Amino acid sequence: MSVTVGTTSAQTPQQSNFGGLKAQVAAYVQGQNQPSILADAGMAINSAIDHLNTRNWNWLLKQQTITLVASTATYTVNANFKRPRKLTKLDTNSKVVGWFDYQIPKAFLNANWGDVNDGDPWVYTVRNASDDRLLTFNVPPSSDFVTNAPTARLDYFARAQHFGADGDTMGTLEIPPEVKNYLVWYARWEIASMRGDAGQIRAAENSWQRAWKHIAMDDRDEQTDWSVGGSYQ
């Protein structure tokens, strides 16, 4: 019997919301019922997300479709952009017909592409991923180029967003369930540094570092549906 899969579904196991996570963190220093400690716990959880964002994660791979405009070399990428993965060229049927090579901003600027005539771009860069997020081609696309390849699909590593409201879940932020222990223990480490004792600080630090190692090992670049060569492991 076939099973129809919906276009969207909630992650399992079900995720705690921001309010629940704050309570777990605050309870580490017996502050789950104290508004000031709960507020500190919320800031500590978002601090954990900031640390999380110092690395590229495969579960934060996103896509953006960029509509190309003749004689326009520069486009703004999404606000959650962190690092590029691949930029592919799409035809009028949204089929892949090629790709663009990436250059780091320093190499791109040193190439001194300058003001050139419209043509067929083949190289791009993103000048400042933390500020203006400008994706620039080495050559402005010509009208003929845009006619044949009107869009480009950018695969990129995103940044995880901060929690805001207590009802926000990790699923809302598109963070997988296995990251929860890291967020909680990192935040407990920060809370203990402010309000706990040396033993609590040390225990929380050891716990978040173990959790970090586990999620980093789980986030492998290669995801396969079977072992190499089809043999059992």
Image: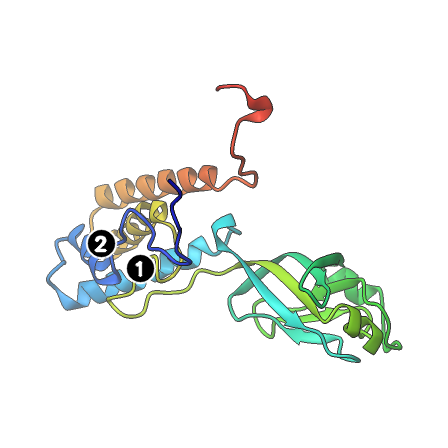
Q: Secondary structure at mark 1?
A: helix
Colour setting: rainbow
Q: Are marks 2 and 1 in contact (CB under 8 Å)?
A: yes
Residue type at tag 1: Ala
Q: Nearer the viewer, residue 76 or 14?
A: 14
Q: Which mark is residue 92?
A: none
- Residue position for label 1: 44
| x, y percent for residue 7 | 42, 58
Q: Is residue 52 left or right of residue 223?
A: left
Asked if residue 4 is positioned above or below residue 66 in the image, the reply reads above
| x, y percent for residue 78 | 55, 70
Q: Which mark is residue 25?
A: 2
Asked if residue 59 is positioned above or below residue 17 in the image, the reply reads above
Asked if residue 126 is positioned above or below residue 204 in the image, the reply reads below
Q: Nearer the viewer, residue 190 or 179?
A: 179
CA–CA distance between discs 2 and 1? 9 Å
Residue type at tag 2: Val
